[in-house]
Amino acid sequence: MSRPTINDVARAAGVSKGAVSFALNDRPGISPATRARILEVARDLGWTPSTRARALSVSRALAVGLVLARPPEVLRADAFFPSFIAGLETVLSQHGHALLLQVAEHDDLTAYRRLAQEGRVDGVLVTDLRVDDPRPALLEELGLPAVVVGPALGARYAAVLGVDDAPGIEAAVEHLVSLGHERIAHVSGPQVMVHARSRRQAWADALETAGLAQGPVVEADFSAESGAVATHELLDLVEPPTAIVYSNDLMAMAGMSVALSRGLAVPGDLSVTGYDDMEMVAHLQPPLTTVTTDVVAWGKAAAARLLEVIGGLEPDPVELPPARLVVRGSTAPPRLV
Amino acid sequence: MSRPTINDVARAAGVSKGAVSFALNDRPGISPATRARILEVARDLGWTPSTRARALSVSRALAVGLVLARPPEVLRADAFFPSFIAGLETVLSQHGHALLLQVAEHDDLTAYRRLAQEGRVDGVLVTDLRVDDPRPALLEELGLPAVVVGPALGARYAAVLGVDDAPGIEAAVEHLVSLGHERIAHVSGPQVMVHARSRRQAWADALETAGLAQGPVVEADFSAESGAVATHELLDLVEPPTAIVYSNDLMAMAGMSVALSRGLAVPGDLSVTGYDDMEMVAHLQPPLTTVTTDVVAWGKAAAARLLEVIGGLEPDPVELPPARLVVRGSTAPPRLV
DNA sequence: CAACGGGTCTAAACCGGTTTAGTGAGGCGG
DNA sequence: CCGCCTCACTAAACCGGTTTAGACCCGTTG
């Protein structure tokens, strides 16, 4: 509720409304003296532009949207969004843009549609890309600028922020191989999610590169519960793996607990790796070997890119810090047969 | 970017702009026939009101703000915000309000000030209340409606959503007492935070009620790291506690790992309780006894209350689901002396 | 029959900015 | 000395809604 309006400033400075607007936006056509006077008056009055009015007149919302398409119970344990949002916000606020959040349990397409139609945002961020995701097409149809965050699966969409999960998983597999493991299993995320798929692929590729046979895979859903179930399944095999590469920390954590509860030693009998490097996993017993990524940096890059797209600028490619394997106590050479 | 404007609808329906506005807002003064025609035309054209324009003319932003005043690295491991936000959003979106997020590393007062001056929001939510928190006063000064979420420490602020941490902690202490523990320590959060303080107080009160001597307290900062440090400190005492009540799950987790790494059995040698009931703690080894709260419900209640305050309505008191102790494997009777 | 009243609708002001068209003064060249 | 151009600025339109004042038509009533 900005008390003084541009009219008040104009009156107080004895000039027209337009002149004030020019002066405040550093546009030519105002003498230095007048400009200085206007700025001074504006400052004295404590004037700040009304975003509402500006948004209407420039036909821009000065805000971008993020749709969280995960149900609350999943969101709860999520390692990604808080950091991502923090990254987004630092860049957005520097550019006077606000971040609008929308939580859509399932029907996220409607959420995007609403955001677009109500004219609340100038663009949106798309995360958690699914296979055959209908959202990019929808956004194109709506004419809403967007940046897709995820593995750049083909350059099908122009504004993609390439996030490559593969190197991290590959590093994990290589690490296990170098320790001497030969039966390396994988607990994947749901294969409709593009990043779950790409992590699984990376695991398979790395095994092949190492000249090892493909290990068993169990598809889970990124939740701790599902990780526990998957782990039981793997350990019940006639020839259980000596190491498991999990697609995220939550499942790895739960898996580790399952192994311990079955009387297996970690890493003695079973090595375990995660992905995300959540704060707590460094404090588990044993601390978890995992892949760390700079999600805040992703957020910053995504925001910067979206602003470029909105502004019609040529998005300049950003170099994201690569995922990095953090070796802790949950991995060790396999027990000799 | 709503293509058709109210003018297009008016023209197509052969009426004036004002008539359309009346018809669409169910205001009297329009004949049923005309109203029906206008609505039909609007539907055919796929018209949706521009929030931008509406916001300007009704002098309301139709959005509320939430300032996350935690640094990214803390936000990362946070159990609270994602759920809280999910709760907020369900209510807000039902009422056509958007949620604006701002992340302020430290200088959160500026964030609130900006939100208010730019006229981006109609009200804000205040969480993580600190002792002698300057924010309520600032918001009062700014004339920005607000709802404070936190322990209702005195009715100093009108619009407070009372969240009582005490019963949960008390239940944890009582549980430990009933198991036979007599040396019950506490690892608290930073005492500048109101909820950290109230949890600590609840612990102290419960001990007194049980007729037990006050146990040792170590002040930590809610992070896993600090929980680990605090736990070492407690276990190094000449007479170490047989049970530790932690102010949150993250610290409890780390504490449990520390105990295990020192060769102590949990819960054999040390019982441990947490607070928050993060998803993963049920999958630890042993699973953590902790306090569960319905944060999504808080979010809903906070949003509802804020909308009432904004609308000038008398906020009707909401009954929040109480915190509840969830007993799992990390607590057991103390080893006999 | 004129005055009145109620219902329906239009015209125009308004929210607070941005932007365009246009005006008047002054400087310069011819 | 005149015409032209530039500079500094004003007036007004515009964004897309809401809202107020008032016009018009119709049926009642004294």
Image (cartoon, coloured by chain):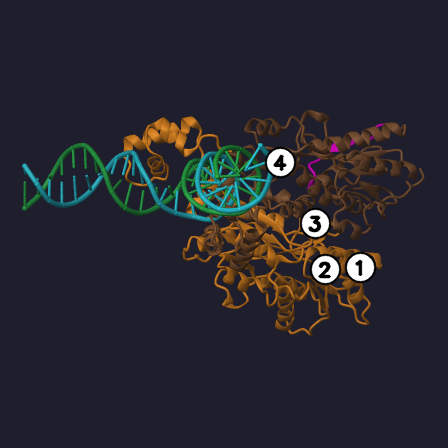
Chain colours: A brown, B orange, C cyan, D green
Label 4 chain ID:
A
Query: Can I make out residue B286 in this image?
Result: yes
Residues indicated by labels 4 and 1 sit on the same polypeptide chain = no
Q: What is the secondary structure assignment of the residue under circle 1?
A: helix
Magenta stretch: give its range: A214-225
Instruction: Mark 4: give few (<14), some (14-19) or many (20+) Cα within 10 Å.
Output: few
| Res. A100 mark | none
Q: Are marks 2 and 4 in contact (CB under 8 Å)?
A: no
Rendered image quadrant of residue A226: top right
Measured in 3D between alpha carbons, the distance from the residue under mark 2 to the one under mark 1, in whole angstroms, is 10 Å
Residue at image mark 3:
B76
Say what amino acid the circle numbered 3 marks.
Arg
| Nearest-to-viewer mark from 2 and 3 | 3
Residue sitting nearer the eye, A112 or A56: A56
Residue at image mark 2:
B272
| Res. B259 mark | 1
Label 2 chain ID:
B
Residue A324 coordinates in the image, percent (x, y): 82, 41
Label 3 chain ID:
B
Q: Are marks 2 and 3 in contact (CB under 8 Å)?
A: no
Residues indicated by labels 2 and 3 sit on the same polypeptide chain = yes
Sooner in the amino-acid sequence: mark 3 or mark 1 = 3
Measured in 3D between alpha carbons, the distance from the residue under mark 2 to the one under mark 4, in whole angstroms, is 54 Å
Q: Are marks 3 and 1 in contact (CB under 8 Å)?
A: no
